[in-house]
Amino acid sequence: MQRVTIAQVAERAGVSTATVSRVLSRRGKVSAAVERKVRRAADDLGYQVNVIARALRNSRTDTVGMVVPSITNPFFTSLVESVEHALGKEGKELFLCDARSDPRIEARRLASLAARNVDGIIVSPSHGVDSRPAVQQTADRLPLVQLDRFVDGTTTDWVGVDDVAAMRQVMDHLHEGGARSAAFIGSLMTHSSTEQRFAGFRRRAEELNIEVKPDQVLLGDYSVEWGEAAVARLVAEGGLPDALVCADDLIALGATRACRAHGFAVPRQVQVTGYDDIEFSRLAEPALTTVHQPRDRIAAEAVRLLAAASLAKDAERGPHARISLVPTLVVRDSTRAAQTPPDRI
Amino acid sequence: MQRVTIAQVAERAGVSTATVSRVLSRRGKVSAAVERKVRRAADDLGYQVNVIARALRNSRTDTVGMVVPSITNPFFTSLVESVEHALGKEGKELFLCDARSDPRIEARRLASLAARNVDGIIVSPSHGVDSRPAVQQTADRLPLVQLDRFVDGTTTDWVGVDDVAAMRQVMDHLHEGGARSAAFIGSLMTHSSTEQRFAGFRRRAEELNIEVKPDQVLLGDYSVEWGEAAVARLVAEGGLPDALVCADDLIALGATRACRAHGFAVPRQVQVTGYDDIEFSRLAEPALTTVHQPRDRIAAEAVRLLAAASLAKDAERGPHARISLVPTLVVRDSTRAAQTPPDRI
DNA sequence: CACCTCAATGCAATCGATTACAGCTGAGTT
DNA sequence: AACTCAGCTGTAATCGATTGCATTGAGGTG
């Protein structure tokens, strides 16, 4: 269906295809008169470059691939939006793939993107270990940046937030609100995000003397359902601690809901925190206290790294960057505001 | 970076590129011995087809483009997921674009997809009128299916739900719950979805003798913020009717929240309904009564239509299909269950 | 006027896979 | 033994845009 080719434009303008190409891609010198003729002809015919042909010749597609674990997770969705926006400024397009949280599908997507000659890939890996072969292989062939999560033992650029610092803020806040015991509800430790967040949680809990019972660290997946199930389990096994620290907002929303369903008032009896600051965390009842990720900034950095990597080419694959941004705590109604300062020793 | 070419495989296997191509694409006869040699060589070298080169030659990319008005709207997100799944079964990939609700961006996306030789396009147009030129032009060049929304005056395939029938169910349900007056909160009438839903709303309201004050039809956009703003306006201008019928779930969630903020109990004092059945409608407090769209089915039909259109080619661009599926009402807590049957004349 | 310079333009190769057509081989036929 | 034919395999053209190199011609110089 792609009808008009450069040859037809050339014929109509009475010049060679080379000249047309030079005019249209603004490379090389062309006299003003000829340029006008060519543009005229191109407009008349409604010419549009064939991106495929150009890509074959240039081995550049001005397209970046992105693979996320789940396109239905609002956090990734808004990350995608930010990335697309950042790319738009550079005149690049985004090719988005959903890995459905399955490293095998993810591997297929990555291979497919590579085969399509995308200029670079942004991936938030589905699994901290099983995603390794595909991610590493892909990174060996073209510029790749990991976003948010990362795969253990890979050497690629990475952009994300400082989970440990974030959890420190969360724990301090809960502590000020009077929490003296807490549970952690996350996905599996094979997700770097849960792993890091848990590490930060545990460390600060110890420092603040907040009790964390071994069986109150519950690991499932990033979903509302798991948040609900986890709370049900806690309730069944002896009740809730002062605070539920969740590894993402979906879990926290489910947890909050389950708390109320089981008759626990949030935040009066249990405080709940999330992570990501998705739009719905604001709308929940009570509105969720959570950690806001600077998505636009993350996206911008990722795009910048990709661009840099594309330029450097194979030449000097310099050391890879690990950019970690500092997230901010967003306090809402699911936690208690600092009351009379809790007694400290 | 795409290193291994068919020529290298050919050399290694001691055959011509033609033979390699025949083996790898399973076309044409090749002796078993040669086939083995070729496969061996291909594996050894880690050969992978260059999709770009193939696309240039075949003018088929096994890729379908999809354009949605907003990737952060959970309804579209899950629609995308369904489409990707349906395409996966046919060995096709999805190229997703976000139009940011702007017909101009949408036009660029469509052009870009066409230039990339996608095999077909699935689009949920951003605007019922302004999207026309781009959509129609694109549809003239390649198979195109409109999803959910459609552009006035275009002749392309379309798949969606029967909004009028859905609103009929909604209104009947509200009426049984005792509603005798209602407001409608939608996006602009330039979105076919709002237009259709409003038409269904108005018609059934008349039939059931439900009062709809002229200034209680509020039009904004599909967002939580608008839902909140609309309710604020209603409250300021004289109070709420018995029911708030919203054109989508985002609006309804915002509306619900605003009702409570203004001290109106849902559903006791005001009933609220949404449309789409996004995941969060279940989680809201109270859980939202809404219209469930059969997303998988919609996606499957769209993919089927595209495939059919690709086959038919220019030859017999037969009449276009308009497939409308019947959605189902999902009753939750934001509306009252039918009580003592309301008095009927 | 012969010759040189340099900008503008054209020619043709190139990217990698596919495929129409031609050529080859060997088994089967007469 | 000559011939036919089917089945493989190779040669080369093709998809459309880009670009190194060659060519052209205008303008300048001695």
Image: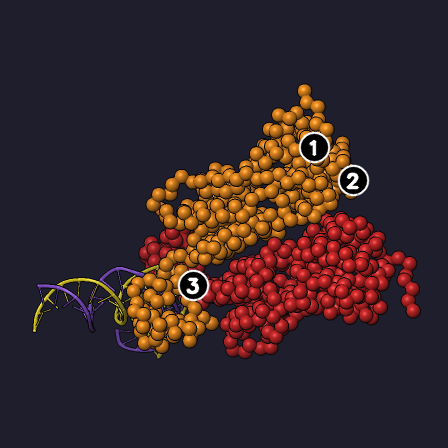
Chain colours: A red, B orange, C purple, D yellow
Task: Return the x and y of residue B190 as percentages of the image width and height.
Answer: 57, 39
The residue beneath circle 3 is B51
Q: Nearer the viewer, mark 3 or mark 1?
A: 1
Residue type at tag 2:
His
Which residue: 67% across, 30% down?
B175
Which residue: 68% across, 46% down?
B282
Q: Chain of mark 3?
A: B
> Quarter-wise, where is residue B156 in the image?
top left
B4 displayed left or right of A226:
left
Which residue: 37% across, 59% down?
B58
Task: Return the x and y of residue A327 as percentages of the image width and height.
Answer: 72, 63
Q: Can you say whether A68 is above or below B323 in the image?
A: below
- Disc on res. B338: 1
- Disc on res. B262: 2
Say if residue B168 shows up in the picture. yes
> Quarter-wise, where is residue A145 in the image?
bottom right
